[in-house]
Image (cartoon, rainbow, N blue to C red):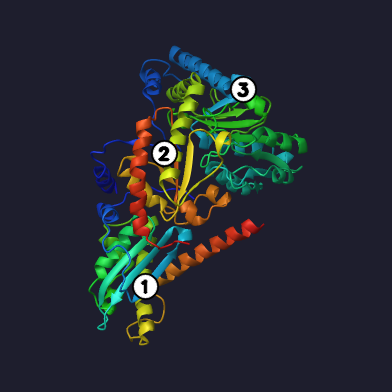
């Protein structure tokens, strides 16, 4: 309930002004969403992953702040052209945060959400394919857990709001 | 981090025009006001008003004259009813804590509206630690207090009620007089406080007509200097001071009086009231042009709060669907238009404006809200410029959103 100063970096501002790989992807074979509009923080990734498990195309849409837009944009640049295994292993929220030149601590969750959405997409891809590789951990990663936690919080808030309305 | 801000500022070079509409959160202080303040730093009245020398007596004189003027503007009976505080936050803290502590023997229940500003809400949270409880009375979809629920909420255990005269986010003007009557009919011992920060200088505020016991006003909200406000405490009402220190002319607020800021606040009040009708008419004209322009130009927008005479003349609050608020404030800033948003995006708690939620707006509607306040200094050209740049700013953010988060 309190405000904090948000001195975004030049990189965040640049990506906010000129986001890369923005918009829907018509030939996407995996679409993943993380976050919730109730939190004011939501990302969709569209990916085209080819038969060799390489992320051939990726794009995003973001309902969120400048940090949300910038981290989603940088994620698309980081993993485009990568094998999904490398994408899974190389891209962490810390790396994303570094790539945008750092984020105010209250905005860390934006990078976490972006990476959570990517990991979700990769799981979904293998589920669709019906073949889960050995390297893919069964347990949720930190970013996936955080994304879930944020979504659960949003649902709780929405429920509380509905209950209050009915009263 | 400062380096980051330097880069952000560099991105704002060569703006064709700048229009500041974030008068909720801070304001431009006009030259007449700073000119009035300056001599009090080094030319005169720089002494402590409680001390026995010329600069002290000069300070005493101007502080008393200022209190006299502010008491008149607020409709108070005597100047001793005015306490200058370092802002409305401090005045609200003093009002709630001071009145609660001094009157705890009468009861420990506090009644407020659901849409009180943070500096009331959080004080009532703090008072829980001291054995007080708070009941929040709901508002309707335009932000009007439910008077029936208010009546139910106050009782023999109630020590204090606090309802803002005009809401700081959505501008809704509450029926304070009726609310005071309802509260006092039920229990005349209950003290009634109103935060009049967003009413003062916009609609007539007369504490005697309203029959309130305590009332807060803010300097910057009428284009005075920041760091100054005042609390009206009706003669005979018991309020404890909440800070300890050297007490001077301000019985309820210790420390050395800030004479230049008191002078600036008083000057700002004079500027508002010397041409009150014209000032208000101008604010309203600019605000209406802004609101009509936005509602006419943009699809999927919702006007938040009361309409017509039941809304203060400077406040515009609009929810823009499929458009995240913080992103929009940055996009507009890069074009020289400065507004604030009810978005939660800067908060890890992820909760948007409690006021918009209380009037039944969905979270997504609150996240996409922008708050703007006009002043007597805005011109037609300013508003025209805002209306020129807003649609393209909204469209760009909506382009990033796409269909994500559309519910």
The reply, left or right, for residue B109 in relation to residue B90 is right
- At x 41%, y 33%, the residue is B27
**Dot 1 surroundings within 10 Å: few (below 14), some, or many (20 or more)?**
many
In the rendering, at what x and y percent does residue A33 appear? 40, 69
| Label 2 chain ID | B
Distance, label 2 to label 3, CA atoms, is 30 Å
Q: Secondary structure at mark 3?
A: loop
Q: Nearer the viewer, residue A96 or B143?
A: B143
In the rendering, at what x and y percent does residue B96 appear? 61, 38
**Quadrant housing residue A147:** bottom left
Please count the marks in the image: 3
Question: Looking at this rendering, what residue extends furthest in the front direction?
Answer: B296
In the rendering, at what x and y percent does residue B240 appear? 62, 33
| Label 3 chain ID | B
Question: Looking at this rendering, what residue extends furthest in the top direction?
Answer: B54
Residue A104 appearing in the image: no
Q: Viewer-nearest of labels 1 and 2?
A: 1
């Amino acid at each position: 309930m309190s405000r904090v100063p948000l001195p975004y970096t030049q990189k965040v501002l640049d990506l906010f002004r000129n986001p890369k790989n923005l918009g829907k992807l018509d030939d996407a074979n995996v679409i993943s969403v993380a976050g919730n509009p109730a939190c004011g923080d939501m990302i969709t990734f569209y990916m085209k992953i080819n038969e060799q498990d390489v992320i051939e195309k990726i794009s995003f849409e973001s309902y969120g702040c400048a940090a949300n837009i910038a981290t989603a944009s940088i994620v698309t640049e980081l993993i485009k052209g990568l094998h999904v295994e490398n994408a899974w292993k190389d891209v962490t929220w810390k790396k994303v945060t570094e790539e945008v030149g750092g984020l105010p601590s209250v905005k860390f969750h934006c990078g976490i959400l972006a990476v959570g959405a990517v990991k979700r997409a990769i799981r979904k891809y293998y589920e669709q394919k019906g073949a889960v590789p050995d390297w893919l951990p069964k347990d949720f990663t930190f970013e996936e857990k955080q994304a879930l936690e944020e979504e659960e919080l949003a649902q709780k808030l929405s429920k509380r709001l509905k209950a209050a309305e009915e009263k | 981090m400062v380096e980051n801000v330097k880069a952000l500022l560099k991105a704002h070079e060569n703006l064709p025009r700048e229009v500041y509409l974030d008068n909720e959160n801070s304001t431009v202080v006009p030259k007449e006001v700073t000119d009035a303040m300056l001599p009090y730093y080094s030319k005169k009245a720089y002494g402590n008003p409680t001390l026995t020398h010329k600069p002290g007596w000069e300070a005493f004189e101007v502080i008393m004259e200022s209190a006299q003027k502010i008491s008149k503007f607020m409709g108070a009976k005597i100047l001793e009813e005015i306490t200058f505080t370092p802002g409305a936050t401090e005045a609200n803290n003093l009002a709630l804590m001071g009145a609660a502590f001094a009157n705890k023997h009468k009861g420990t229940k506090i009644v407020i509206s659901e849409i009180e500003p943070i500096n009331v809400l959080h004080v009532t949270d703090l008072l829980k630690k001291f054995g007080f409880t708070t009941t929040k009375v709901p508002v309707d979809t335009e932000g009007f207090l439910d008077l029936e629920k208010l009546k139910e909420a106050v009782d023999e255990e109630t020590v204090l009620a606090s309802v803002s005269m005009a809401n700081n986010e959505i501008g809704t003007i509450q029926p304070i007089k009726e609310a005071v009557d309802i509260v006092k009919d039920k229990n005349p011992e209950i003290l009634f406080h109103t935060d009049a920060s967003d009413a003062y200088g916009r609609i007539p505020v007369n504490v005697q007509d309203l029959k309130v016991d305590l009332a807060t006003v803010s300097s910057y909200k009428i284009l005075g200097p920041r760091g100054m406000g005042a609390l009206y405490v009706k003669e005979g009402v018991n309020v404890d001071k909440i800070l300890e220190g050297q007490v001077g002319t301000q019985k309820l607020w210790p420390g050395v009086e800030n004479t230049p800021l008191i002078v600036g606040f008083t000057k700002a009040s004079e500027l508002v009231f010397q041409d009150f009708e014209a000032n208000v008419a101008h604010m309203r004209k600019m605000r209406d042009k802004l609101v009509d322009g936005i509602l006419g130009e943009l699809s999927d927008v919702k006007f938040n709060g009361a309409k017509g005479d039941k809304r203060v003349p400077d406040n515009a609050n609009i929810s823009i669907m499929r458009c995240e608020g913080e992103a929009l404030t940055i996009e507009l800033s890069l074009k020289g238009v400065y507004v604030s948003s009810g978005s939660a995006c800067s908060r890890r708690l992820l909760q948007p404006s409690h006021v918009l939620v209380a009037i039944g707006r969905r979270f997504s509607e609150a996240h996409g809200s922008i708050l703007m306040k006009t002043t007597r200094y805005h011109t037609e050209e300013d508003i025209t410029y805002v209306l020129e740049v807003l649609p393209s700013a909204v469209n760009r953010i909506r382009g990033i959103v796409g269909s994500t988060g559309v519910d």
